[in-house]
Image: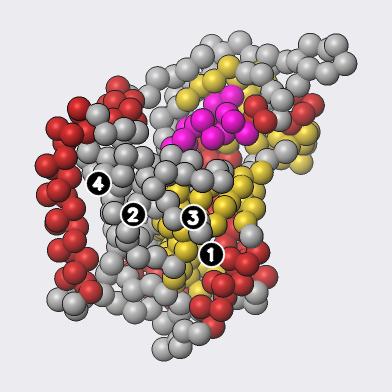
């Protein structure tokens, strides 16, 4: 079972995976896009466009590949690593679909449509101050004013928000690597892979096309499922598989993330068999997509769970189970990030 993503999204996914005819036709537009982006970067680099330095260090976690590559789990991991190193981190984000120009703090009572699903998940999992808004400099200033104890900021995305100076940049890719290696719209890249950064992280693969060999590998691990309406109830994922001659429950796996295949692959690695429902990224769950689903168990991502909990019909659906994932990275990355932060003089 699959809830079809838009035809345009499917077309672009195919186009960006190879240098075919459609991509070649779009290449002149990519050259224009790349030229304009380069002029903009140069303007900030030369001081012709004003950028602002914040009073605490800033670490940007982002991607140049359009779509989801796993920034949210990496951001949560980084917050926890910084806290273990003695820092008090806060997170700033654009917030997908957020239209309010005024910075807004994310709390347990926040609505996903007002602050974005990913910031809501970060606030829930990382248990740190989170603020969203269009202008990251204004958002960062508002967070520091509201939480003066914060001594380092993690920006969830914002690589291209050059007006905000940063101390460390982490660029994240997944198994798709750089796709066909071309810029938008002929390819999936916002900036060239040659773009300078401090660290390259690769999610879920040992190697990927177009990436440097020293990319740091990130694994997303999820071994359990939790009841949506009572997160204290949990079971190993393996318990949903057929064992000892017993029939497994009928399972639907649903994912409204940038790369649903990554979630489905995690479930298959646990030995599960299921139908797939690939929802559009950031699906809002204003309508219940499971009303007519004949399944005993519905497995969903944490990103989708923060929105399902805010819908009464979904919240009370006892078939829904959430699969939390945790990012695992080489501890040396955290040590290098802390070294860079401690080498930076704070104004």
Where residue 193 is drawn, which disc sits there?
A: 2
Asked if labels 4 and 2 touch by Cβ distance under 8 angstroms, the answer is no
Task: Give the number of the disc on residue 213.
Answer: 3
Q: Residue at x 44, y 55 (%)?
A: 212
Label 1: which residue? Answer: 129
- The reply to whether discs 3 and 2 touch (Cβ–Cβ < 8 Å) is no
Q: Mark 1 vs mark 3: give the one in front.
A: 3
Q: CA distance from mark 1 to mark 4?
A: 34 Å
**Between marks 1 and 4 in the image, the one whose residue lies nearer the viewer:** 4
- Note whether 183 is above or below 88 in the view shown: above
* Residue span colored magenta: 253-266
Residue to which mark 4 is pinned: 183
Q: Which mark is residue 80?
A: none
Give the spatial CA distance, label 2 vs label 4.
9 Å
Above or below 237: residue 171: below
Q: Residue at x 65, y 64 (%)?
A: 331
Q: Residue at x 34, y 79 (%)?
A: 53
Please rate how many residues cluster around mark 2, counting C-alpha atoms within 10 Å: few if below 14, some from 14 to 19, many from 20: some
């Amino acid at each position: 079972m699959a809830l079809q993503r838009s035809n345009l999204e499917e077309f672009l996914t195919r186009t960006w995976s190879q240098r075919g005819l459609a991509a070649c036709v779009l290449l002149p537009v990519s050259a224009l896009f790349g030229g304009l982006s380069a002029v903009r970067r140069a303007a900030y680099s030369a001081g012709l466009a004003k950028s602002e330095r914040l009073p605490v260090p800033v670490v940007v976690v982002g991607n140049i590949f359009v779509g989801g590559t796993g920034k949210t789990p990496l951001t949560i991991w980084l917050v926890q690593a910084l806290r273990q190193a003695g820092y008090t981190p806060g997170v700033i984000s654009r917030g997908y679909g957020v239209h309010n120009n005024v910075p807004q703090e994310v709390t347990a009572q926040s609505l996903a449509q007002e602050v974005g699903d990913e910031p809501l998940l970060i606030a829930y999992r990382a248990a740190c101050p989170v603020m969203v808004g269009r202008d990251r400099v204004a958002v960062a200033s508002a967070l520091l004013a509201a939480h003066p104890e914060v001594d380092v900021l993690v920006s969830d995305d914002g690589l291209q928000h050059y007006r905000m100076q940063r101390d460390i940049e982490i660029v994240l890719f997944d198994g798709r690597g750089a796709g066909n290696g071309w810029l938008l719209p002929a390819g999936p890249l916002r900036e060239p892979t040659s773009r300078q950064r401090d660290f390259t992280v690769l999610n879920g693969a040992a190697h990927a096309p177009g990436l440097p060999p020293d990319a740091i590998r990130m694994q997303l691990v999820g071994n359990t499922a939790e009841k949506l309406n009572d997160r204290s109830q949990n079971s190993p994922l393996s318990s949903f598989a057929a064992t000892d001659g017993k029939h497994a429950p009928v399972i639907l796996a649903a994912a409204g993330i940038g790369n649903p295949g990554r979630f489905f692959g995690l479930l298959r690695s646990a030995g599960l068999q299921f139908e797939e429902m690939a929802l559009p990224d950031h699906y809002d769950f204003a309508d219940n997509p499971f009303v007519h689903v004949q399944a005993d168990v519905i497995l969903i991502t944490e990103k989708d769970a923060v929105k399902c909990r805010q819908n009464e019909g979904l919240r009370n659906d006892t078939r829904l189970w959430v699969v939390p994932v945790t990012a695992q990275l080489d501890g040396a990355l955290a040590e290098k990030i802390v070294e860079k932060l401690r080498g930076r003089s704070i104004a």
